[in-house]
Amino acid sequence: EAAVTQSPRSKVAVTGGKVTLSCHQTNNHDYMYWYRQDTGHGLRLIHYSYVADSTEKGDIPDGYKASRPSQENFSLILELASLSQTAVYFCASSEEGYAEQFFGPGTRLTVL
Amino acid sequence: AQSVTQPDARVTVSEGASLQLRCKYSYFGTPYLFWYVQYPRQGLQLLLKYYPGDPVVQGVNGFEAEFSKSNSSFHLRKASVHWSDWAVYFCAVYNQGKLIFGQGTKLSIKP
């Protein structure tokens, strides 16, 4: 069964601090994605990657960096966390860009 | 620009009643379309997908959707809802390597 795991599952960070969210997939998928979900909103794409060692900007990349060191791992980095980055973050993977995306359980980030 | 609109933020139906959740898309050409479901405190799961072909697609748990090019719509339907269908439903369109999601429709079930 396809599996996407995220760590941590929840985190409290201080304003101005650095936060790293990690995602690991065992699907052997080339595509990986980071989304954020805010209460009452849909998912918005932050960064994505279709090959290791390369990342692409999504629709809302400002304030975020991404890293894809291997096919299995995809990290989201907040260098200077801000209050507005409080949200739930989802990682997903897919075999192709147009194919089904498999989502992780999410990371609830609270920035104080 | 490519986009997805789900006009109903919230829908409430009685258990056993039929359901339609609306989705309108904006896309130049023939789109690839998806419906995902998000149960409480979980990630999204695929319900069904449309790739160009038969306009009516079947999904899991008795869900189906119908693609209409003339109406730019991809509405989700179910003949008889169950309390376990209580969730948020997202419509999405594929565009240049990524999915564009609608805002979601929160479905509540009356006993």
Image: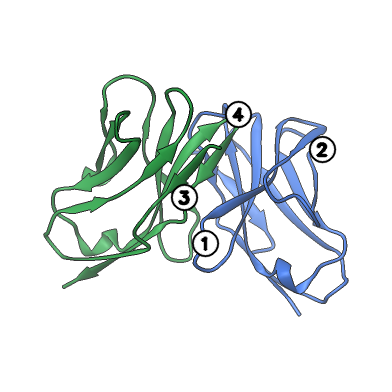
Instruction: Report whether mark 3 lies on the same chain as mark 1.
Output: no
Q: Position of residue B18 (x, y in %)?
A: 14, 54
Location of the C terminus of chain A by quadrant is: bottom right
Image-based side of B10 in relation to B77, left or right: right
> Color of chain B here?
green
Q: Can you identify the residue that label 2 sits on?
A: A69
Give the label on residue A8, or none.
none
Does residue B100 lie above or below B110 as drawn?
above
Query: Residue at 70% across / 51% down in the picture?
Result: A60
Looking at the rendered structure, the secondary structure element under dot 4 is loop
Image-based side of A75 in relation to B49, left or right: right
Q: Amino acid at mark 1?
A: His
Query: Residue at 28% across / 43% down in the picture?
Result: B75
Q: Amino acid at mark 3?
A: Gly
Q: Give neighbour class at mark 3: few <14, some 14-19, many 20+ (Cα, 10 Å).
A: many
Image-based side of A29 in relation to B19, left or right: right
> Separation of disc 2 and disc 4 at Cα?
23 Å
Give the label on residue B102, or none.
3
Q: Given this view, does label 2 or label 4 mark the residue nearer the observer?
A: 4
Q: Are marks 3 and 1 in contact (CB under 8 Å)?
A: no
Q: Amino acid at mark 4?
A: Gln
> Color of chain A here?
blue
> Separation of disc 3 and disc 4 at Cα?
17 Å
Closer-to-camera residue (B39/A39): A39
The answer to which quarter of the image holds residue B55 is: top left
Q: Can you identify the residue that label 4 sits on?
A: B96
